[in-house]
Image: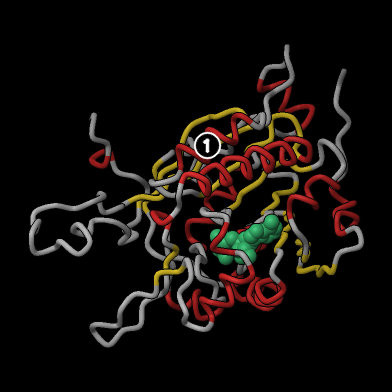
Amino acid sequence: MRAKTRPIETLPELAFDYTHGIIGQSLIIHADCLEWLSRVPENTLHAIVTDPPYGVKEYDFEQIEKRANGNGGIWRIPPSFDGHTRQPLPRFTALNSKERAQIRNFFIEWSKVAMHALRPGGHVFIASNAFLSQLVFAALVDGGLEFRGELIRFVRTFRGGDRPKNAEGEFPDVSSLPRSAYEPWGILRKPIPKGMKVSDCLREFQTGGLRRTPDDRPFTDIIPSGRTPRCEKKIADHPTLKPQAFMRQLVHAVLPLGVGVVADPFMGGGSTIAAAEAIGIASVGVERYMGYYELSRQAIPKLAAIQTPEEEQPEETLLPFA
Ligand SMILES: C[S@@+](CC[C@H](N)C(=O)[O-])C[C@H]1O[C@@H](n2cnc3c(N)ncnc32)[C@H](O)[C@@H]1O
């Protein structure tokens, strides 16, 4: 049986009874995304581009307050040793096996509600980190999504690479973890209905494939990227704001025909929604924390207006097997 889909003109209806706002072609909603995704009618969204709380617990309201007050909590407040105050980072390695099981269960549940809301063939691009990606991607597959590969944001995160804690002098030539120079993003898809080819899915649901770049290259799974520019962080003071130059490439690629609705259920400061606005795509952002919802409302138009430098294309020399 063919699934029924939903016309995009009805986008504002997806706000239900939640506090929401409309910015250009985008809808922003203050809600818990697990609840929101389960309320969205089946087979509605064309794609999801999102950056979830990796450790689940760093975005608990209590932890957000601790970070704001400089008390740490799960947020590692780095020392200001050279006169520059660094952004706190979540302490992923502090997760124990019970917390890892909670993450797994969270992403299985999330995958199930995302499957419900997505159209058949709809893609999910989901940010992770090298330490947790294996756990998160496997849980998403257990929830029903199909694993289609990984996208590497080639960026120096400055995570990892430290000498063994409290034994730095004893083991000066050792690092506990590699210094991370990439951010892995999962590429997943709601399975295409049995018997359908990608071309059928494109015709019926406008999903199933990925859009080629504006200069007619295939979307490539390594994207060189800088860290988020200071001017963007000034607009949206969110601890994990993603850069516009990178997000615009993802939002462009995730809709194979350039039509439809992209959702970001963990909207944060609104970088995905701003990227969609910048390239003329309809989107829905959902954020649970009122402070960040309000932040996104004022930041999205400004981030969308930013001119990004022409993105470099990946060079063959980056590929170790060439
Ligand atoms: C890693 S951040 C996303 C940052 C975003 N990519 C940006 O550029 O600003 C994750 C966000 O998800 C929010 N969040 C956590 N759990 C949520 C939930 N269940 N529903 C909706 N938002 C949630 C957090 O408050 C946080 O702002």
- Residue 230 at what x, y percent from top left? 43, 76
The answer to which quarter of the image holds residue 248 is bottom right
Find numbered disc 1 in the image and state the secondary structure of the residue it sits on.
helix
Colouring rule applied to residues = secondary structure
The quadrant of the image that shows the N terminus is top right
Q: How many marks do you count on the picture?
A: 1
Is residue 232 shown above or below 160? below
Quadrant for ligand 1 reads bottom right
- Residue 278 seen from this side: no
Residue in the image at 84% along x and 48% along y: 8
**Position of 303 compared to 10: left or right?**
left
Residue in the image at 48% along x and 63% along y: 243
The quadrant of the image that shows the C terminus is top left
The front one of 274 and 133 is 133
Q: Which residue ends up furthest to the top in the rendered image? A: 195
Q: Which residue ends up furthest to the bottom in the rendered image? A: 83
**Position of 274 compared to 320: left or right?**
right
- 10 Å crowding of disc 1: few (<14), some (14-19), many (20+): many
- Residue 229 seen from this side: yes
**Position of 204 compared to 319: left or right?**
right
Residue in the image at 41% along x and 74% along y: 87
- Residue 267 at what x, y percent from top left? 65, 61
- Residue 251 at what x, y percent from top left? 60, 50
Q: Amino acid at mark 1?
A: Phe
Is residue 34 shown above or below 122? below
The residue labelled by disc 1 is: 137
The front one of 304 and 103 is 103
- Residue 56 at what x, y percent from top left? 57, 55
The front one of 209 and 89 is 89
